[in-house]
Image (cartoon, rainbow, N blue to C red):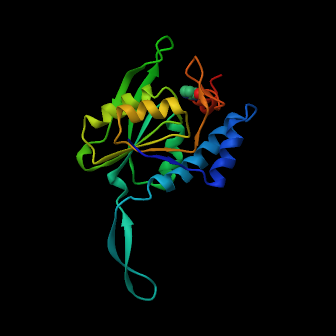
Amino acid sequence: MSTVHLIDHPLVQHKLTLMRQKDLSTHGFRRLLKELAMLMAYEVTRDMPTQPIEIETPLETTTGQVIDGKKLVFVAILRAGLGILDGMLDVVPGARVGHVGLYRDPRTLTAVEYYFKLPADMGERDVIVVDPMLATGHSAIAAVERVKEVGPRSIKFVCLLACPEGIAALQGAHPDVPIFTAAIDRQLDAHGYILPGLGDAGDRIFGTK
Ligand code: URA
């Protein structure tokens, strides 16, 4: 069974609580999501490999460690995943970016793919799939399945909010993919929304409702 990493740092919890509030502006929601994504990037990249390089300080030569940002690929599940991408790229600007376009069929709640684009040479890359909400798990499962087809070195999944149903579904389909989340909420409702949740993440990021 894959591990679930709950990122419950006080700063993360504080910002998430502000984001849940229904009266928060679109601008405020987007700004907080970006800040949260930066904090979550810190946790999810904790085991990223580094390599030594020789550098000159003003006083002498020394050896420091650097990451190879280009080996990292953030894969955003469209469209709400774009809201997390911004903050993550601020922290790892050298990362490559992939996109998986999926929409939820409102009747069956299953994921239907309409777009898929990843960088080349995926065999030597570490992938972090991002989507703010792990609800039914259908989109996450479908996105990870497609990413696995190109055989990356590793895959992680990052969301802002998860629920027990989504975690169980993703773990059942992809037991090798660790899940990083800022909170695990109570349950899914009949329409596939997380309770208490924060509403429709895409609508709140882009102000479409
Ligand atoms: N997607 C959302 O945007 N919100 C939910 O609560 C569930 C899925």
Name the residue located 62 percent from the left edge and 39 percent from the top edge: 30
Residue sticking out furthest to the top: 107
Closest to the observer, 111 or 87: 111
Position of 18 relative to 124 (above/below): above
Give the image location of residue 86, x and y in percent.
52, 45
**Residue 134 in sight here:** no
How many discs appear?
0
Give the image location of residue 151, x and y in percent.
24, 41
Closest to the observer, 171 or 142: 171
Name the residue located 50 percent from the left edge and 29 percent from the top edge: 165
Closest to the observer, 10 or 35: 10
Residue sticking out furthest to the bottom: 59
**Residue 49 in sight here:** yes
Q: Tell me which image quadrant ligand 1 sits in.
A: top right
Q: Where, quadrant-wise, is the N terminus in this rendering? A: top left
Residue sticking out furthest to the right: 23
Left or right: 64 in relation to 15 = left
Name the residue located 59 percent from the left edge and 48 percent from the top edge: 36
Q: Quadrant of residue 53?
A: bottom left
Left or right: 80 in relation to 185 = left
Give the image location of residue 167, x and y in percent.
47, 35
Position of 123 relative to 26 (above/below): below
Q: Quadrant of residue 10?
A: bottom right
Give the image location of residue 103, x and y in percent.
46, 21
Position of 188 relative to 10 (above/below): above
Name the residue located 65 percent from the left edge and 22 percent from the top edge: 209
